[in-house]
Image (cartoon, rainbow, N blue to C red):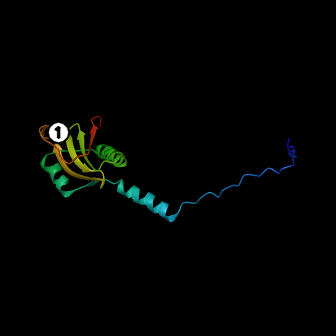
Amino acid sequence: MNKINSITASKFQPISPVKKPVKQPSAFTDTLKTASKKQATLTISKHAQKRLLDRGVYLSSAQWAVIGEKLEEARTKGVTDSLVILKNAALIASAKNHTVISVLNRDEASTQIFTNIDGAIFIENI
């Protein structure tokens, strides 16, 4: 039989954890945050402005704010072109560009077929 060498225990020094330096935000990160905040501003195309006036559709600043928030949320989920249904209107909007493209009143929208839309947003409570 072979004799197994015994392992002698020696005193080991524990290794202290290495503290990693906290990364400071880079100029790129700051620029990205600024750009994403700028894009959150909702743009209304000239065509949509004309449709708002022609069709007598009025939206409050609170409604515009909610529309902008929901378009941004839709964009983060991969939606590019959206139909936004409100109590009194329907909007075609680009979530990608954060732009309202066209506006219809709700009665007019009830008989329309909407194409090239990959998302729908229903906002009935504002």
> Residue 42 versus residue 7: which sits nearer the camera?
7
Reply above or below: 76 against 33. above
> Which image quarter is the N terminus in?
top right
**Badge 1 local density, few (<14 within 10 Å), some, or many (20+)?**
some
Residue position marked by numbered label 1 in the rendering: 106
Residue 53 percent coordinates (x, y): 15, 50
Residue 24 percent coordinates (x, y): 58, 60
**Furthest-top residue in view?**
125
> Residue 97 versus residue 47: which sits nearer the camera?
97
> Residue 56 versus residue 4: which sits nearer the camera?
4
**Furthest-front residue in view?**
1
Q: Which residue is pictured at 37% across the width and 48% down the height?
A: 76
- The type of residue carrying mark 1 is Arg
Q: Which residue is pictured at 32% across the width and 47% down the height?
A: 71
Left or right, residue 50 beside residue 11: left
Residue 33 percent coordinates (x, y): 45, 57
Reply above or below: 25 against 77. below
Reply above or below: 108 against 37. above
Counting the numbered discs, the total is 1
Left or right, residue 106 beside residue 16: left
> Which image quarter is the C terminus in?
top left
Residue 118 percent coordinates (x, y): 26, 45
Secondary structure type for disc 1: helix
Place residue 35 in its image quadrant. bottom left
Left or right, residue 109 beside residue 70: left
> Residue 110 versus residue 120: which sits nearer the camera?
120
Place residue 58 in its image quadrant. top left
